[in-house]
Structure formats: C-alpha cells, structure tokens
Image: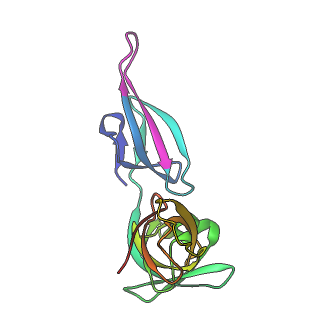
Amino acid sequence: MASIGMGDLKKGLKIEINGTPYKIVEYQHVKPGKGAAFVRCKIKSFVDGKVIEKTFHAGDKCETPQLEDKIMQFLYDDGEFLQFMDSATYEQIALTHDQVGEAADWIIDGMNVDMLYHNGKPISVEAPQFVQLKIVETPPNFKGDTQGGKKPATLESGAVVQVPFHVVEGDVIKVDTVRGEYLEKVK
C-alpha cells in the first residue's frame, strides 16, 4: 500500500486510517504564525457515513485504501436480507438493511446498483441518481386542483415523495434519489 503524506492531501482523496476507508470532503492548509504548518480535514467514512474532523501534521502518514467498485443487480428482499448478484460472475451476496442504508428506499427487483468493496467486503451501496418508479398509492385528484400544490405518493420501492396533483396511481415518475425529489412524469 502506498503511504500518503500531509503534502499529498486534497479534497476528494480517498484515504485509510486505522483500517477504515475515508474520503476527504473538506481540506484546509493552516500556517500559524508560530510553529509548523498542518492540514485540517473533514473526512467522511465509507463504512458508516459519519463525518469527522482530523488534523494532519508534517510526518503523519495514512494509507491508500483497497477500494473496488462493482455493478451489482438487486434480486429481491427476503425480509431479513437484501439479495444482490454480481453481473459479471453471477456470485450472490446478502446484505442487511443497515448495510444497504438509504439506497434500499429507491431500488426494485432487477435494478443495477453500485457497490463499493473495501478489502473484499461490501461497505456501501448506491442506487442510480435517477430512477423511474411506478406510483402504487396516492390520494385521488379533485376537480379544480390546479394550484400547483403537492401530495404524497408511495412508490413501488416503498419510498414516499411529494408529487404534483395531476400525477395519479399507476403513473411512472422519474425521481432524483440523492435529493429524494420528484422530477417528472415519464410518458
């Protein structure tokens, strides 16, 4: 593994500290009037998503993490585990709802997701940024509802988003999974 020194740090860099992979989300090089320069960073854990602050001094080293991205297909939710399959090797893997996190709100059977591996173990799952999902439940429209308001709609994945009044049950909509927002009705 390659060592990364204080001078190599920058925003977006992936590093490993005490066996945990992190991504630098904020970076600040500090040169105090007295003493040696240091780097203050905010780093986000790939494992649990927590952001912590870390200070690096001259001579401090961290490692380059062994990360690998794989495209996996979501097969089904058996109640206890979410089942995924590697599209290249057909190897199946089961993850808990906690391991999958928020991505579980946006995925349906057969959908491809990005899975990040660290040292051969899956650590995070990302749904595509834009997905097309069918509305399975939403209040009916009322004549005269044209003011551009919003109403809740439950999607086939189980997620609930706010949609315009003209959207009805059975419609397929495009959703931004990062912001959790309705974008448009799919024709």
Q: Residue at x 53, y 72 (%)?
A: 143
Task: Name the image quarter holding the N terminus.
Answer: bottom left
Q: Quadrant of the C terminus?
A: bottom left
Q: In the picture, residue 90 is in which quadrant?
A: bottom left
- In this picture, which residue range is highlighted in magenta? 29-44
Q: Where is residue 105? Give x, y as percent.
A: 56, 70
Q: Is residue 175 in the magenta section? A: no
- Where residue 153 appears, as percent x and y from the top left, is 56, 71
Q: Give the vertical position of 32 relative to 96 (above or below).
A: above
Comparing 50 with 38, the one in front is: 50
Outermost residue toward the bottom in this view: 90
Q: Residue at x 51, y 59 (%)?
A: 149
Return the x and y of residue 129 as percentages of the image width and height.
39, 66
Q: Residue furthest front?
A: 144
What colour scheme does the image use? Answer: rainbow
Viewer-proximal residue, 6 or 92? Answer: 92
Looking at the image, the residue that sits furthest to the right is: 80
Viewer-nearest residue: 175 or 148: 148
Does residue 163 lie above or below 47 as drawn?
below
Q: Check residue 35 for magenta coloring.
A: yes
Residue at screen point 47% across, 78% down: 133
In percent of width and height, residue 185 lies at: 40, 74
Across the whole image, how many numbered discs are drawn on residues? 0
Q: Of residues 28 and 142, which is closer to you in this image?
A: 142
On screen, residue 187 versus residue 51, left or right, reads left
Q: Residue furthest left?
A: 8
Query: In screen coordinates, is 98 left or right of 126?
Result: right
| Location of residue 89 (image quadrant) | bottom left
